Image (spheres, rainbow, N blue to C red):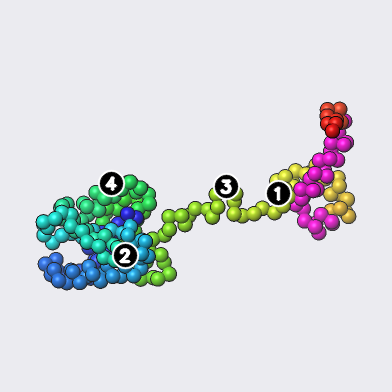
Amino acid sequence: MRLLIDGYNLLHAQGLTGPANDAERLRKAREKMLKTLSKRLSPMDRHVTRVIFDAAQKLPVAPRMLWVDGITVEFASESSSADERVIDLIDRHDAPKKLVVVSSDNEIGEAAKRRGCRIIGADEFMEILEDPRRPVLVPLNAAKPASLGRSSTQLPEGMVPKETDYWLEQFADLVADESIAQRLDREHTILKSIDVAAIEREIRDSDPFEKKTRKPPAKS
C-alpha cells in the first residue's frame, strides 16, 4: 500500500457529502469519487491504493472490503471510526516513509508525521486530482540519481579548477610573459591531462632530488 485515503474527509473536500442518513446520496458520492480517482491513477497505482470509509452500521463481516478498478475500498466496521482505522494502518505499515496519506484530520496528520509518512490535505489532493499535469503518486525512484556510482554529469577532460589554480600559481613567472598569458586566455585556463604530464616530467627532470632517488628502468 502506497496511497491511503480518508474517504469521507476527501468527499467533504469535493463537496459531495450530504445528510449522514442519506445512504443513497453517500453511495453515489463514493462512486463518483472512486471513479475520479481511478481515472487519475495508473493501473499499477490503483493496486497500491486503499480508501477507508466509515460504515453506516456494524456490518456482519468486519472489516468489509470491496475493489473498484483495483482500488481497495474498506468500510471501518471493526473500528469505531475510519480515522482510527487509518491511524491503525499507518502504525502497522512496514514502510511508512513510502506511504502517502490523504486527510485533513489533525490526529491522522500527527500519526503520519510521527511515522515519517507524506501527508496531503484533502483540499490539496483535490487540486492534484483536478490537474491532469500533476501525478497523483510520484514514482518511488523519481528522486534517485539516474545512475549509480559515476555521476551523470560529465566533467571536462583535464583538471578541476582548484588544481588549475595551484599549477598556475607555481608557474606564475610563465604567465607573466604577455604572449603566454594571451595564449592561456585564448585557449582556456583548464590544463588537460597531456599538459599536466608534460609539467610533471619537467619538474622531475629539473629536481636534483628526483634524479638521485629515481630508479633506473627495469631491464627487459
For label 4, the SS is helix
User: Which is in the foreground here, disc 3 or disc 2?
Assistant: 3
Q: Quadrant of the N terminus?
A: bottom left
Q: Residue shown at 15%/60% (left/top)? A: 55
Q: In the image, what residue type sits under mark 2?
A: Asp
Task: State the mark number for residue 161.
Answer: 1
Q: Which residue is mark 3?
A: 149
Q: Is residue 171 visible?
A: no
Q: In the image, what residue type sits under mark 3?
A: Gly
Q: Which residue is mark 4?
A: 92
The magenta-colored residue range is: 182-209
Q: Position of residue 64 (x, y in %)?
A: 18, 57
Q: Residue shown at 39%/70% (left/top)? A: 131
Task: State the mark number for residue 123.
Answer: 2
User: Which is in the foreground here, disc 1 or disc 3?
Assistant: 3
Q: In the image, what residue type sits under mark 1?
A: Pro
Majority secondary structure of the magenta segment?
A: helix
Q: Quadrant of the C terminus?
A: top right
Q: CA distance from mark 1 to mark 4?
A: 51 Å
* First along the sequence among labels 3 and 4: 4
